[in-house]
Image (cartoon, rainbow, N blue to C red):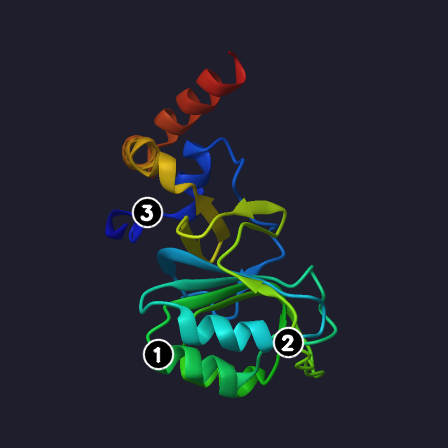
Amino acid sequence: MNHFQNIPTTCISDAMQGLNNMDPAIKPLKEEYRIAGRAFTVKMPVGDNLCVLRAIREANPGDNLVVDAKGDTYRAIAGDFILGLAQTLGIQGIVVDGAIRDIVGTKQLNFPVFCRGTTVAASGKAGWGEINVPISCGGTTVHPGDLIVGDADGVVVVPRSKEQEILQKALEKLEQDRKRAERVSGKVAEVKQYLDDVLDK
């Protein structure tokens, strides 16, 4: 899992042909946020976040909460107080297909939050929802224990059963990108040759 920590999501996405990317609207609150850890999944009805609290209690340190809030951006799944609870218990970050609130306070936590938007409205606590079950988040299937990697470009899901295969492909892509950049960087003739090679295929 730690091997993915320093690989850009773009390389991981390329290794999976872009098939396990979350909706690009789900972005980090701060560009410097980065996560790479196991998914602890949450399936919540719109506007009812009690199961998020249950997930915070049950998740292991280092887990990432991945919350299917059905894309709702009117009611927040959490604010700075609840996110601070998650941070205190060692949760690595939260990814939500939905919204959060208390933006200034949340940013001050320096706790990685990836979300679809922000809002002022709170959720209720009727008690519905499920935790640690397969979900869809940002249009992508997430199973408990899948690897969640997020950075400034977005969030990708690495199925647990294919981790080693995808890691190898992502590392190869990273090396290819490095060599390509090194070959053409600042060199007019090499840039022209690269463009010719690509465009004349």
| Among the two numbered marks 1 and 3 on one chain, the one whose residue lies closer to the N terminus | 3
Residue 32 vs 163, above or below: the answer is below
Which residue was labeled with disc 3? 7
Find residue 87 and report its image quarter. Answer: bottom left
Residue at (37% x, 55% y) in the render: 38
**Horizontal side of residue 125 vs 148, given as left or right:** right
Bin the neighbour count of mark 1 within 10 Å (Cα to Cα): few under 14, some 14-19, many 20 and up. Answer: some
Q: Residue furthest right?
A: 74
Proximity of marks 3 and 2: CB atoms separated by less than 8 Å: no
- Marks 1 and 3, how far apart at CA: 26 Å
Residue nearest the viewer, comparing 149 with 135? 135
Residue nearest the viewer, comparing 102 with 190? 102
Of badges 1 and 3, the one in the foreground is 1
Q: Residue furthest left?
A: 3
Residue at (32% x, 47% y) in the render: 7
Residue 154 vs 189, above or below: the answer is below
Of badges 3 and 2, the one in the foreground is 2
Q: Kindly identify the amino acid type of the residue bearing the numbered disc 3.
A: Ile
Residue at (66% x, 70% y) in the render: 128
Residue nearest the viewer, comparing 167 with 131? 131
- Looking at the picture, how far across and down is residue 135, in whole percent? 57, 51
Q: Kindly identify the amino acid type of the residue bearing the numbered disc 1.
A: Leu
Which residue was labeled with disc 1? 89
Q: Kindly identify the amino acid type of the residue bearing the numbered disc 2.
A: Gly
Which residue was labeled with disc 2? 127
- Looking at the picture, how far across and down is residue 60, in whole percent? 34, 67
- Marks 3 and 2, how far apart at CA: 38 Å
Bin the neighbour count of mark 3 within 10 Å (Cα to Cα): few under 14, some 14-19, many 20 and up. Answer: some
Residue at (56% x, 45% y) in the render: 141
Residue 11 vs 197, above or below: the answer is below
- Looking at the picture, how far across and down is residue 127, in whole percent? 64, 76
